Amino acid sequence: MAGQVNPDLGKERENASFNTQKLTNFLYGGAEKVRRRRYIESLAFSDPAYSSDEDPTFMSREELYSLGLKRAVTMLQRVKELNIAEEDLGTYRNAALQGFVPGIGLHWVAFTPTIVQQATEEQKKKWLKPAQDVSIVGAYAQTEMGHGTFVRGLETTATYDPSTQEFVINSPTLTSTKWWPGGLGKTANVATVMAQLYTQEKCYGPHNFMVQLRSLEDHQPCPGVTLGDIGPKMEGNGNDNGFARFDHVRIPRENMLMKFARVEPDGTYVQPPSSKLAYSNMVYLRGTFVQGAASTLATAATIAVRYSCVRRQSEMKPGEPEPQILDYQTQQYKLFPQLAAAYAFWFAAQFMTQQHGSITGSMEKGDMSGLAELHALSAGLKSYTTAVMSGGIDVCRMACGGHGYSHASGLPALFGLGASLCTAEGENTVMMLQTARYLVKCFVQSQGGKTLTGTVAYLSAVQPSPVAGNKNMSDLGTLVAAFQHRAARMVRHAAMQMQNEMQKGKARADAWNSCSVLLIKAAEAHVHSFVVRNFAETVQTVEVDESIRAVLMSLCQLYSLHGITEHAGDFLMDGYLTGGDIDAASSHVSAMLARVRPDAVALVDAFDFHDKTLHSVLGRYDGRVYEHLYEWAKKSPLNKSEVHESYYKYLQPFLKSNRAKL
């Protein structure tokens, strides 16, 4: 059965207009990187230590935690034995964990990068190697019960005592309890703790401190530290998201991460060159969320598109065989915009990675000029991409009908994990308001005569009055210009409305709050505009093959046109687009759906997701859905016996009693 491919899927692949392997190479940065990635994955897929038939879907929380930790430890051992290079670690981890979400994962996602980015060279010598070797297990303890996104409001304190040259870490209130950090409950023995720094009777805001949580000998909590697990979540229950309270826990002065700011032995605070440097790690994390949103939405699209080619339903024409449900335009309209968005976000994530590397290099040289823009872009992109991804997964789930509701599809678990990204490392509304604050500042500067650059350059270039005349609604340049005009108009409108509110006598904070819905919409328009422009520019760089450029062009057009039709009112508001333009956009959307249809399976295949990481019966590469759905169902623990013990305890006595009364 494993060697057979569903005939419908086979035909889809044969009829594609482009070479799938070439597109895969383009997505991952070249043929050699794809070859290396597949080789690294094969090391895990062929390892008998990971070849368990155990399905996380059927496990209790304790089983998920225990087996997830077992798999993670095995993975860490193999990384050393196989000498896996640092650039291959992410690929190997994903292939080894195969659906398990262990709490130790935050050790390399957040804890170790914090040391890399915020520790001095001397501190790295002490902590970085143990972190990289996992001789210590770390958590990133920022979020509290009462505060999350608003980092400046954190209540945990770190008070410097110059007499002993120690910081005193304390949780002064119930709401100051650290709450949610992955691995904090039972796994981590060390944490980077974000706390308000007090020295010489003055608060200097949140800073990171290295705090030991548990004994390195018997794993018992250290004196003054209270730890625990916060309980079940929507998904990801193998992760021991935890709580921590500190009762005047003393740590050495050197345990403050001091790459940018520091406290001298006498308690003197030395400020960082930029007040935003303390947030650099959050910017990095939010950037990874954009890639997470892209790959998660791509996974959902892969499952739904493949299944939609296997599933046949109803009659399109009386008397003819049941068609593949992907042949229905309504199904295409559900799925292809999600597929296009996955590609758009994929390229946006690549841009973010490049920008982060470039600006980090500049920061190392003391140049902070790009940090504000990076912060605004990362916040907006994190918010926008995760929100679209979360909604898109549910569209894909519903497009799979009843089977999409089953955990066999992989979509419920995917939705649960994806939804967590909408609030993790910054709640999405607050993130978008951070972007809005930067946009208003840039708009005011532009009004003052400053020429803007980078991702906000269009705010200087776009004219406030619409350009008359019919537009070619299939031209990428026209589409990019339309999105930039929409964003510029909405930023201008929100900023002017704020000014009007202040002229009426409102304080700036009150004016901001009364305009916050407008500001959110303006920021969303800005980010949407960026994603469209970046997608269009990426298409222009395609040199590998004209057929690859053509299919990506179709996806970019679909993504852009679908955005216009979904937000038609924004484009019609000032007459920039006409009703005729919107009608033309709608017609082009229909044409793009038909154009993408023959390549849909090849486009999801190009993401190169192995079945062992896809975790979906419906999305299997071979398309043998129904056979495997039946086998999957038989694994349910309820099927271990023909008659469940509860029948004898509850139902049988009840039925006997009722029969006796007849």
Image (cartoon, rainbow, N blue to C red):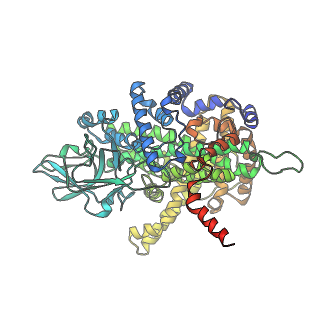
**Number of numbered labels in the structure image:** 0
In this orientation, which residue lies closer to the viewer: 217 or 394?
A: 217
Looking at the image, is 626 positioned above or below residue 645?
above
Looking at the image, is 303 positioned above or below residue 438?
above
**Residue 415: x and y, percent?**
55, 51
Q: Is residue 367 visible?
A: no
User: What is the quadrant of residue 203 in the picture?
Assistant: bottom left
**Residue 552: x and y, percent?**
65, 38
Which residue: 36% across, 40% down? 113
Which residue: 27% across, 57% down? 156
In this orientation, which residue lies closer to the viewer: 652 or 399?
A: 652
**Quadrant of image for the C terminus:** bottom right
Q: Is residue 429 left or right of residue 134?
A: right
Which residue: 55% across, 32% down? 28
Q: Is residue 628 visible?
A: yes
Identify the residue at the far bottom of this view: 504
Q: Is residue 403 left or right of residue 355?
A: right
Looking at the image, is 2 positioned above or below residue 334?
above
